[in-house]
Structure formats: structure tokens, C-alpha cells
Amino acid sequence: MKYPWVALSLGIIWISTTFLILKKENIDATYVLMVAFVGTIIIALIGLRAPKIKK
């Protein structure tokens, strides 16, 4: 049940980013998108890595 939570958190990041950009008038959309992009990369690297096989 690890991967659905990762996908859900990534979806929440991008939905909230979209909402933030659409609702705020004076916001730097490039900065907000870059923060969302970096957060997506970090969560994907941590949450979607393959499990280690124990020998």
C-alpha cells in the first residue's frame, strides 16, 4: 500500500498548486511551479524507489 499514498500526495501537491495559482492575483507562478516540481521529484525519489531485496 505504499505507492497509492505516494500518488495521492503527488496529486494533492499539483491540485493545490493549480488552486493557488488560479485564486491568488499577485503570485509568481514560475516560483510556485518550481517548488511543486522539486517537491514532486523529492517525493518520487523517496516513495517510488524499488524495495531492497534481502539475501
Image: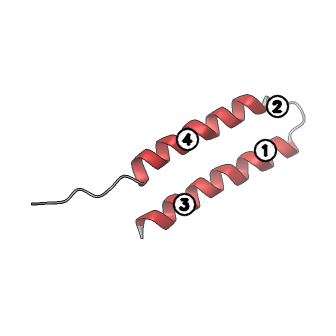
Q: CA distance from mark 1 to mark 3?
A: 20 Å
The nearer-to-camera label among 4 and 2 is 4
Tell which of 39 and 52 is nearer to you. 52
Q: Quadrant of residue 36?
A: top right
Residue 3 percent location from the top left of the image: 45, 64
Q: Residue at x 51, y 41 (%)?
A: 41
Which amino acid does the dot numbered 1 rest on?
A: Leu
Q: Amino acid at mark 4?
A: Gly
| Residue displayed at 69% across by 36% down | 33
The amino acid at mark 2 is Ile
Tags 2 and 1 in contact by the CB under 8 Å rule?
A: yes
Q: CA distance from mark 1 to mark 4?
A: 16 Å
Q: Position of residue 21 (x, y in %)?
A: 81, 41
- Along the line of sight, the residue nearer the viewer: 45 or 22: 45
Circle 3 is placed at which residue position?
7
- Alpha carbons under labels 3 and 4: distance apart: 13 Å
Which quadrant: the C terminus?
Answer: bottom left
Query: Which residue, given by chain and number where applicable, does mark 2 sit on?
Result: 27
Residue of label 1: 20
For label 4, the residue is: 39
- Give the mark nearer the N terminus: 1 vs 4: 1
Q: CA distance from mark 4 to mark 2?
A: 19 Å
In front: label 1 or label 3: 3
From this view, report whether residue 9 is shown above or below residue 2: above
Name the quadrant of the N terminus: bottom left
